[in-house]
C-alpha cells in the first residue's frame, strides 16, 4: 500500500509539473498577442467559458448511473488545457518543420496538419488519461470512465486551442478587426466544428485506456491491443478532420459528423456493457441484502433514485437514503473488475458500509 | 454519512514505471521532434527570378518575384498558403496573406500592421504610409519599420476587390546605413540586401505573371 501511495504521489507531482510546463509554453507563445490584444483576448475567453462549462456538465452528465467525481474531472480538463496543449505547440512545431524540410513547403502546407496533429495531440491528450489511472486508480474502472475522462481532457484541449486559434485569426486577418476575428473563430471552431472535435477523438482514445485498466479477466496482451486500436481510431478521426479532403462546401460538416457518430457509437457500445454488468452485480448483491431487488430497479437511474428518496418526509432521512444509494453504487462499481484480486476484500468492506449506512436510516 | 469511503481509499496498484514511461513519451515528442528537425537544413536556396505564389489557392492569391541571387527560404516557417519567410544576408523578408472579413476593413490594414508589428516586438515603430505602385500596377501603401535594433520597410497591397491583402515586411540591421557611410563591406551588403528586398516588394502582382 505504501508503494501504491508513493507511485500515486509521484504521479500527482509529475502531472502537476507537466501542467505547469504546458502553461509556461503557452505563455511564452501567446503572451505578446495577449499583450497587444487584451480586449479581444477577454472576449475570446468570455466566449469560451460558457462553452467549457456546458461541455464539462454535458460530459459528466452522460456518464451512465452517476457522474464521475469532481476532482479527477477537473484534473482532466486542466491537463487538456495546459499540459497537452502546451506540449503540443512544441511537438507540432518540431514535426511540422521535419515535414517542410524533408518533403517541401507545399507538401507540408497541404499535409502537415493531418500528419502532425493526430500523432502528437492524440498521444499527449491520452497521457492525461493514463496519468489519471495512476493518480486516481478507482476513477477509471472501465471503458465508460475512459470515454468520459477522455472527453474531458479533449474538452480542455479544445478550449485552449480555440483561444489560440482566435488570437491567430486576429493576425491572419491583419488585425483589422480583432473582435470580429475572435467572433468569427468562435463561430467556426465552437458552433460549427466543436461538435466533433478534440473531445470526440480523446473520448474514443480514452475508451481504450478504460479497456486496458479494466480487470475483467481479458489477457493483458489483448487489452493492450484494444487500447492501441482505440488510440489509432482516434488518430484516424483526427487525420480525416485535418486532411485536405472533402474540400467541397459543407465538407467540414461531414468531417464533424463522422467524428461525432464514431464517438457516440463507441459510447453506446460501452454504456450498454456497463449497465448490463452493473445490473448483474446488483442482482447478485441481493444475496447479501446490500441491494434489495426493489432497490436494484431504482438504483441505476438518476431520476428513479431521486424518486426513491422523495418517499422520506424529512431532509435528514432523504440525505441518509442518498448516502445508502451512494454506498450501494460504490459497491456495485467496485465489483465491476471481476479479475481484480482486491475486489473481494473491498466488496466486503463496502457491504459493511452499506449495512452501517442502512442502520442509520 | 461523513464516513470516508472505502471506494475512495483503495486504489489499484500503479506500476512504478508508469509515470516515468508517460514522461518519456511526452519528452520524446516535445524534445525529439525539435531535435530531429534541428539536424535537417532549413534553408532552401531560391534562384533569382523565381516567381512564388502566396495565398490559399481558391482565387485569393498573389505572386511575387525573387529579385537577385542569394535569397533562401526558411522552409519550417513558410506555408505558401499563408506566409513566406525569405532571407538574404542579415535581411529577412516576410510575405503574408491576410484574409479580410469584408472590403470595409481594407482601410484598417495599416493600423492593423502597426498592431501586428507590436506582437513581434513591443518596441516596433511603423511610420506613416505612403502610396506605392508595384511594377505590375498593384496599388498599396508602404512605410518605414523599426524594431529590436532593426530597420526596414513594410508594405500592404489590398487585392483589387479588397477581399484579401498581402503584407510584405523587410527587416535588416539598423547600422547598415551608418556602416555604408564608412564604405564598410558589411554595410553596403546590408544595404544591397534591403534594396533587393524592396525590389521583391515592388514585384507583387495579383495577375498571373507570364512564365
Image (cartoon, rainbow, N blue to C red):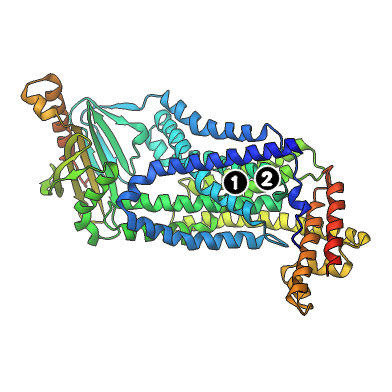
Q: Nearer the viewer, residue A360 or A354?
A: A360
Vertical relation: B177 (above or below) A193: above
Can residue B161 be spotted in the picture? no
> Is residue B197 left or right of A25 when viewed as pictured?
left
- The mark nearer the N terminus, 2 or 1, is 2
Residue at (25% x, 30% y) in the render: B87
Q: Nearer the viewer, residue B138 or A49?
A: A49
Residue beneath label 1, please?
A234
Residue A26 percent across, percent down from the top left = 43, 43
- Which marked residue is nearer to the observer: mark 2 or mark 1? 2
User: Where, quadrant-wise, is the N terminus of chain A in this rendering?
Assistant: top right
Residue A101 percent across, percent down from the top left = 40, 29
Disc 2 versus disc 1: distance between alpha carbons? 10 Å
Residue beneath label 2, please?
A208
Q: Residues within 10 Å of mark 1 (few under 14, many from 20)?
A: many
| Mark 1: secondary structure | helix
Residue B52 occupies quadrant: top left
Residue B54 percent across, percent down from the top left = 29, 42
Q: Chain of mark 1?
A: A
Residue at (87% x, 57% y) in the render: A352
Evaluate whether label 2 is on the same chain as label 1: yes
User: Where, quadrant-wise, is the C terminus of chain A in this rendering?
Assistant: bottom right
Amino acid at each position: 500500500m505504501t508503494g501504491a501511495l508513493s507511485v500515486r504521489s509521484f504521479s500527482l507531482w509529475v502531472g502537476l509539473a507537466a501542467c505547469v510546463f504546458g502553461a509556461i509554453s503557452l505563455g511564452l507563445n501567446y503572451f505578446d498577442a495577449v499583450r497587444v490584444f487584451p480586449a479581444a483576448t477577454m472576449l475570446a475567453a468570455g466566449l469560451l467559458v460558457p462553452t467549457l462549462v456546458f461541455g464539462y456538465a454535458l460530459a459528466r452528465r452522460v456518464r451512465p448511473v452517476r457522474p464521475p467525481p469532481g476532482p479527477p474531472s477537473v484534473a482532466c480538463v486542466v491537463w487538456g488545457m495546459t499540459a497537452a496543449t502546451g506540449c503540443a505547440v512544441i511537438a507540432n512545431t518540431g514535426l511540422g518543420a521535419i515535414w517542410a524540410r524533408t518533403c517541401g513547403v507545399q507538401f507540408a502546407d497541404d499535409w502537415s496538419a493531418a500528419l502532425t496533429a493526430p500523432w502528437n495531440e492524440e498521444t499527449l491528450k491520452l497521457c492525461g488519461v493514463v496519468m489519471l489511472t495512476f493518480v486516481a486508480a478507482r476513477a477509471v474502472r472501465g471503458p465508460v470512465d475512459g470515454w468520459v475522462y477522455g472527453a474531458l481532457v479533449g474538452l480542455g484541449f479544445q478550449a485552449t486551442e480555440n483561444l489560440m486559434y482566435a488570437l491567430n485569426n486576429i493576425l491572419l486577418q491583419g488585425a483589422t478587426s480583432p473582435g470580429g476575428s475572435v467572433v468569427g473563430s468562435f463561430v467556426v471552431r465552437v458552433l460549427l466544428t466543436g461538435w466533433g472535435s478534440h473531445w470526440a477523438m480523446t473520448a474514443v482514445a480514452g475508451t481504450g485506456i478504460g479497456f486496458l485498466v479494466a480487470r475483467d479477466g481479458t489477457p493483458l496482451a489483448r487489452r493492450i491491443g484494444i487500447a492501441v486500436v482505440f488510440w489509432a481510431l482516434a488518430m484516424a478521426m483526427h487525420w480525416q478532420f485535418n486532411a485536405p479532403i472533402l474540400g467541397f462546401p459543407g465538407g467540414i460538416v461531414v468531417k464533424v459528423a463522422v467524428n461525432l457518430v464514431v464517438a457516440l457509437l463507441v459510447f453506446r457500445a460501452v454504456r450498454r456493457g456497463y449497465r448490463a454488468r452493473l445490473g448483474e452485480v446488483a442482482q447478485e448483491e441481493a444475496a447479501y441484502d446490500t441491494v434489495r431487488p426493489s432497490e436494484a430497479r431504482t438504483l441505476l437511474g438518476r431520476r428513479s433514485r431521486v424518486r426513491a428518496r422523495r418517499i422520506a418526509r424529512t431532509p435528514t432521512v432523504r440525505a441518509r437514503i442518498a448516502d445508502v444509494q451512494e454506498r450501494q453504487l460504490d459497491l456495485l462499481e467496485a465489483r465491476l473488475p471481476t479479475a481484480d484480486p482486491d475486489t473481494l476484500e473491498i466488496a466486503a468492506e463496502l457491504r459493511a458500509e452499506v449495512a452501517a449506512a442502512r442502520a442509520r436510516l | 454519512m461523513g464516513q470516508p469511503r472505502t471506494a475512495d481509499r483503495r486504489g489499484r496498484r500503479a506500476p512504478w514505471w508508469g509515470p516515468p514511461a508517460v514522461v518519456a513519451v511526452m519528452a520524446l515528442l516535445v524534445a525529439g521532434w525539435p531535435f530531429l528537425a534541428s539536424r535537417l537544413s532549413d534553408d532552401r536556396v531560391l534562384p533569382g527570378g523565381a516567381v512564388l505564389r502566396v495565398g490559399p489557392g481558391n482565387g485569393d492569391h498573389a505572386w511575387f518575384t525573387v529579385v537577385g541571387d542569394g535569397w533562401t527560404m526558411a522552409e519550417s516557417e513558410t506555408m505558401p498558403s499563408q506566409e513566406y519567410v525569405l532571407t538574404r544576408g542579415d535581411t529577412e523578408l516576410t510575405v503574408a496573406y491576410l484574409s479580410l472579413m469584408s472590403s470595409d476593413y481594407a482601410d484598417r490594414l495599416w493600423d492593423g500592421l502597426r498592431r501586428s508589428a507590436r506582437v513581434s516586438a513591443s518596441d516596433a515603430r511603423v511610420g506613416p504610409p505612403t502610396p506605392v505602385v508595384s511594377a505590375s500596377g498593384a496599388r498599396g501603401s508602404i512605410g518605414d519599420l523599426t524594431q529590436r535594433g532593426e530597420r526596414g520597410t513594410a508594405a500592404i497591397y489590398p487585392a483589387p476587390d479588397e477581399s484579401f491583402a498581402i503584407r510584405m515586411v523587410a527587416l535588416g540591421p539598423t547600422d547598415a546605413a551608418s556602416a555604408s557611410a564608412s564604405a564598410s563591406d558589411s554595410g553596403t551588403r546590408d544595404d544591397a540586401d534591403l534594396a533587393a528586398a524592396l525590389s521583391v516588394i515592388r514585384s507583387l502582382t495579383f495577375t498571373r505573371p507570364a512564365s
